[in-house]
Amino acid sequence: MISLFKNSRRTFIKNSSAALIASLAIPEIVSSAFAVAKPKKITIQDGDVILFQGDSITDWGRSRTQTDANVSAGLGTGYPIFAAGEILNKNFEKNLQIFNRGVSGDKVFQLADRWDKDCLDIKPNILSILIGVNDFWAIAKHGYTGTIDTYRNDYVKLIDRTKKALPNVKLIIGEPFAVIGVKEVDLKWYPKFNEYRQVAREVAEKNDITFIPYQTIFDEAVKKAPGSYWTIDGVHPTIAGASLMAHAWLETVKS
């Protein structure tokens, strides 16, 4: 019993130490990733409506029945709720409304199919989009027949449509990312997956949209702790990974 206690205590201390080191490293990781290409910052204003959109990385278990703003179940358990908590704490006087409408498995054309209800009707002032990993992953995993040109054309059309309907919307585009060597992500992803990352960056640059270099951020993170510390399967974030993403997202806004 004493031996078991010692082993459990040793494991707890080891895990706690790793978590502490990683948490302390998060600001350093984010600042390092943004050092070269500093994001254009968006100012949060009174009464802003903030919408997170994307696939399962954004969805991350959100309730479909809790659709009101600032409801924890409706925000899910991923980076949107980490970011939302920080934003709401710092801007309690601004009457902000924060929504999550990510849907697991979505590709760009599926965002477009539900865009009126899940974006335009919400009328966000700040719109954050993270999409692209399924546009690549589903080709090998589910027999999806889309190409990199499909992804590019669909993304451009979606942004054009959004800007036309919401001319004053402030946009944020997150870079699709993957952590190699963690379960689903192996060498077969490359170099093709890099094209999807580049398209997201190009769409952001051509439209003067704030861009979050998530791949660079996770590349920096694995220098501090193993990829499995930050992601479950190379794509979906752990709690630490979601916190890392939220910190990066918060670097793009000014309260």
Image (spheres, rainbow, N blue to C red):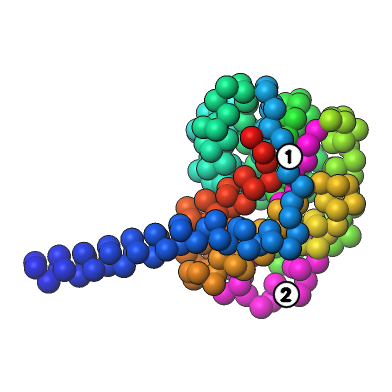
Task: Single out the residue that lies furthest toward the bottom.
Answer: 187
User: Which residue is at a point 56% across and 65% down the rendered structure image?
Assistant: 221
Count residues near mark 1 (Cα–Cα under 10 Å), then give few for <14, some for 14-19, many for 20+.
some
What span is colored magenta in the figure? 169-196
In the image, taking residue 69 as reference, residue 197 lies left or right, namely right
The quadrant the C terminus occupies is top right
User: Which residue is at a point 57% across and 62% down the rendered structure image?
Assistant: 29
Nearer the N terminus, badge 1 or badge 2? Answer: 1
Q: Position of residue 220 (x, y in %)?
A: 60, 67
Q: Position of residue 186 (x, y in %)?
A: 62, 75
Q: Which residue is mark 2?
A: 190
In the image, taking residue 12 as reference, residue 82 lies left or right, namely right
User: Which residue is at a point 61% across and 72% down the rendered structure image?
Assistant: 180
- In the picture shown, does residue 105 fall above or below 126? below
Q: Position of residue 59 (x, y in %)?
A: 60, 43
> Within the image, what quadrant is residue 123 found in?
top right
In the image, taking residue 126 as reference, residue 96 lies left or right, namely left
Q: Secondary structure at mark 1?
A: strand
Q: Is residue 192 magenta?
A: yes
User: Of the residues shown, which amino acid type is indicated by label 2?
Assistant: Tyr
Indicate which label's residue lies in the foreground, 1 or 2: 1
Q: Secondary structure at mark 2?
A: loop
Q: Is residue 31 magenta?
A: no
Task: Single out the residue that lies furthest toward the left.
Answer: 1
Count residues near mark 2 (Cα–Cα under 10 Å), then give few for <14, some for 14-19, many for 20+.
few
Q: Foreground: 246 or 189? A: 246
Q: Which mark is residue 42?
A: 1
Q: Are marks 1 and 2 in contact (CB under 8 Å)?
A: no
The quadrant the N terminus occupies is bottom left
